[in-house]
Image (cartoon, rainbow, N blue to C red):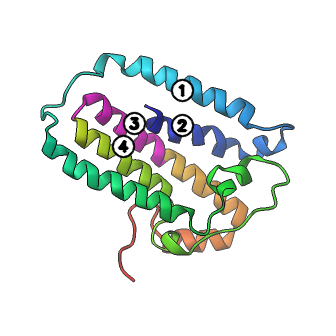
Amino acid sequence: MVYSTIPLFWLMIHPRAQSWRARSGSPYRVLVPAWLLMWVGMGALTAHWRNVMLFIHSTPWSWIPAGILFGTGMLLYKLSRTGFSPMQLYGVPEIVAGNREQRLVTTGIRARVRHPVYLGHLCEMLAWSVGTGLVVCWLLTGFAMVTGAVMIQMEDAELEKRFGEAYAAYRERVPAVLPRLDG
């Protein structure tokens, strides 16, 4: 449930990045409680499907591809930290006024995919779906994919405002989520 709300968390930020930066005090005082309420809401919405299996049931064998997906997600998270500060990963440049760390990172994993963290989230969501076979996991994965696609478009627009032509050229050259595998 928590993973499926991550795009919603970022959807609270990117459309209103300017207004978050204009606020006095930490925007996280509003954002974190709102995100916690999303968890509760998602839990309530999905309670009915928590034990409903998809047409294929989970078996020990289904955890093999799930394990590969989990490992891939963890590797992507690790690679995403290279060249990126914790503040960038937590979205501080987007929402905290006067933050000096405004740099576009296009090396490492980001030379192959613009949003490796979101690809990592997708791998983790798919891992739970494949491994458990639960309808709720598949529904939450679908929900995260739809909201994630919207959020990525908004984030791209916000980054292009912040970094201008440099980001537009990067966006043209590097795919959003499905990585470029060639050299």
Tell me: 80 left or right of 18.
left
The reply to whether callout 1 and callout 4 are in contact (CB within 8 Å) is: no
Dot 3 or dot 4: first in sequence order is: 4
The structure residue drawn at horizontal position 42% and vertical position 55%, both measured from the top left corner, is 74
Against 167, residue 74 (above or below) is above
Q: Which of 55 and 176 is in front in this view?
A: 55
Residue range highlighted in magenta: 133-149
Q: Where is residue 158 in the image (x, y as percent from the top left)?
A: 66, 54
Q: What element carries label 3?
A: helix
The label shown at residue 125 is 4
Q: Distance between the residues labelled 2 and 4?
A: 15 Å
- Helix, strand or loop: magenta stretch: helix
The reply to whether callout 1 and callout 2 are in contact (CB within 8 Å) is: yes
Taking the view exactly as shown, the residue that stands out farthest to the bottom is 183
Dot 2 or dot 4: first in sequence order is: 2
Mark 3 = which residue? 143
Q: Distance between the residues labelled 3 and 4?
A: 10 Å
Dot 1 or dot 2: first in sequence order is: 2
Q: What amino acid does circle 1 point to?
A: Met
Taking the view exactly as shown, the residue that stands out farthest to the front is 60
The reply to whether callout 3 and callout 4 are in contact (CB within 8 Å) is: no
Q: Is mark 4 on a helix, strand or loop?
A: helix
